[in-house]
Image: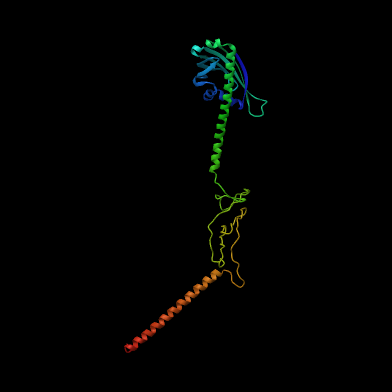
């Protein structure tokens, strides 16, 4: 029995070569494979359930890789025993090459196999044996391509995971409409040419010069008040309408401070009057006692 075919794999040559030597991937790809174990350098033992015409049996086989030319070619030599069902043995030459006609990454796998069978299998007839072998080969490569795609998806996911973790570690920014605000930036402003505006959020402070009734707050140099965000050169100004009261004509600015000063002056004058009144009352009380006791 002879079998020759060509298959295309959606990976590069080194990846295809590694997959053909991956025991787990081969086990998932071989139809009816129950076990595949490495027994030495390039040597394997397999247990496979196969049906050839009306004969179904469990075959215990051995495989040996020879004539290695990594990552381009090797030869597989195999033999298997199926008990009363019979036996089989043979070899296959496998070659890998990049597909020059493919638009993306692609590898062409070519193989040529020869095999012989005996026992009940041989009695089935060469035509049924050939059909069974062709069906197993097609099923193998269908499974092999699916396993390759699954492995590539896992590899791609593992490659993107560290990048996502790095992005998560970066300090985040608070996005305002049209202005990205970086809460972790220094108050000295963004680096030259950065293109991102930074607004520093600080606690507002009041000063004595505030207008009477004003809701606006004065800000110290380099800090932003409640009504405005004072930014250093190159930083965005984030403002909202001011509620500061306008001074009326003839009324001096800083009315709140003036009112406070007047109130303090009035308090001091009141204290002086109270002291004088107390002294006068004590004088009259002393004069009454002197008259009562005859000037003593």
Quarter containing the C terminus: bottom left
Q: Residue furthest front?
A: 54
Q: Residue furthest right?
A: 101
On the image, the x and y values in percent for residue 69 come to 59, 20
User: Which residue appears at 45% of the width and 79% of the height?
Assistant: 273
Q: Can residue 114 be seen from the camera position used here?
A: no
On the image, the x and y values in percent for residue 55 come to 53, 14
**Viewer-proximal residue among 131 and 73:** 131
Q: Is residue 32 above or below residue 122?
A: below
**Viewer-proximal residue among 221 and 177:** 177
User: Which residue appears at 49% of the width and 75% of the height?
Assistant: 266
Quarter containing the N terminus: top right
Q: Quadrant of residue 217?
A: bottom right
On the image, the x and y values in percent for residue 102 come to 66, 27
Q: Can residue 266 be seen from the camera position used here?
A: yes
On the image, the x and y values in percent for residue 14 come to 59, 26
Q: Quadrant of residue 280?
A: bottom left
**Viewer-proximal residue among 86 and 44:** 86
């Amino acid at each position: 029995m002879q079998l020759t075919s060509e298959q295309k794999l959606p990976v590069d040559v080194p990846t295809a070569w590694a997959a053909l030597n991956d025991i787990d991937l081969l086990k998932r790809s071989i139809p009816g494979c129950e076990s595949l174990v490495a027994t030495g350098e390039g040597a394997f033992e397999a247990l496979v359930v196969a049906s050839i015409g009306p004969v179904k049996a469990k075959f215990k086989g051995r495989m040996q890789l020879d004539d290695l030319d990594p990552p381009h070619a090797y030869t597989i030599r195999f033999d298997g025993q199926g008990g009363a069902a019979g036996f089989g043995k043979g070899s296959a030459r496998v070659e890998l090459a990049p597909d020059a006609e493919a638009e993306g990454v692609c590898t062409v796998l070519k193989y040529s196999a020869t095999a012989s069978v005996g026992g009940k299998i041989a009695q089935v007839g060469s035509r049924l044996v050939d059909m069974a072998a062709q069906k197993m080969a097609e099923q193998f490569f269908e499974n092999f391509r699916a396993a390759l795609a699954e492995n590539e998806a896992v590899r791609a996911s593992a490659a993107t995971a560290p990048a996502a973790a790095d992005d998560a570690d970066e300090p985040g920014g608070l996005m305002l409409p049209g202005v990205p605000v970086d809460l972790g930036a220094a108050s000295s402003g963004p680096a030259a040419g950065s293109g991102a505006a930074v607004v520093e959020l600080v606690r507002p402070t009041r000063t004595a010069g505030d207008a009477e009734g004003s809701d606006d707050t004065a800000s110290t140099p380099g800090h932003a008040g409640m009504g405005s965000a004072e930014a250093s050169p190159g930083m965005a100004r984030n403002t909202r309408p001011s509620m500061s009261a306008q001074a009326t004509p003839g009324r001096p600015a800083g009315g709140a401070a003036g009112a406070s000063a007047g109130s303090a002056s009035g308090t001091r004058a009141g204290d002086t009057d109270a002291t004088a009144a107390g002294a006068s009352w004590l004088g009259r009380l002393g004069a009454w006692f002197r008259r009562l006791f005859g000037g003593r």
